[in-house]
Image: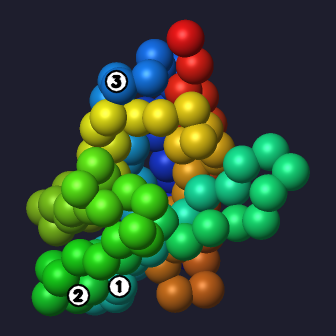
Amino acid sequence: QVQLVESGGGLVQPGGSLRLSCAASGVIIGDYALDWYRQGAGKRREWVATISRAGTTVYTTSVKGRFTVSRDDTRNTAYLQMNSLEPDDTAVYSCGLGSHRGQGTQVTVSS
């Protein structure tokens, strides 16, 4: 049974940083491309970033240069390092692997 569990969210001031984790079980995370998504209150879910099987990364324009996606195959865990956070980054962040999605973790950027 594939399970994805996100953690690391919280409340942070504008300009601050957070690192989200996506721990996988029941699947080898490095065998698939992994996506990060976010959904703000009253908004549609938005794709944020992807790390391919080969480790290539791509980002949506609004986070490019501020967010970094990575993967630790020894821990079967992916990460989303978020720097220079802005209020518009406030959302529930979730990871996706194929057709599987985690429950998400809340990120709130506010002073």
**Label 3: which residue?**
16
Mark 3 crowd level (few <14, some 14–19, many ≥20, 10 Å Cα): some
In front: 103, or 11?
11
> How many marks can you see?
3
Residue visible at 23% across and 76% down in the picture:
57
Vertical placement of residue 7 versus 76, above or below: above
Q: State the quadrant of the C terminus.
A: top right
Of badges 1 and 3, nearer the viewer stands 3
The answer to whether one can see residue 55 in this image is yes
In front: 12, or 25?
12
Q: Position of residue 22 (x, y in %)?
A: 41, 55
Vertical placement of residue 48 versus 15, above or below: below
User: Which dot marks residue 53?
Assistant: 2
Q: Residue 29's quadrant in the figure?
A: bottom left
Residue visible at 56% across and 51% down in the picture:
93
Q: Position of residue 87 (x, y in %)?
A: 57, 32
Q: Secondary structure at mark 3?
A: loop
Q: State the quadrant of the N terminus.
A: bottom right
Q: Are marks 1 and 2 in contact (CB under 8 Å)?
A: yes
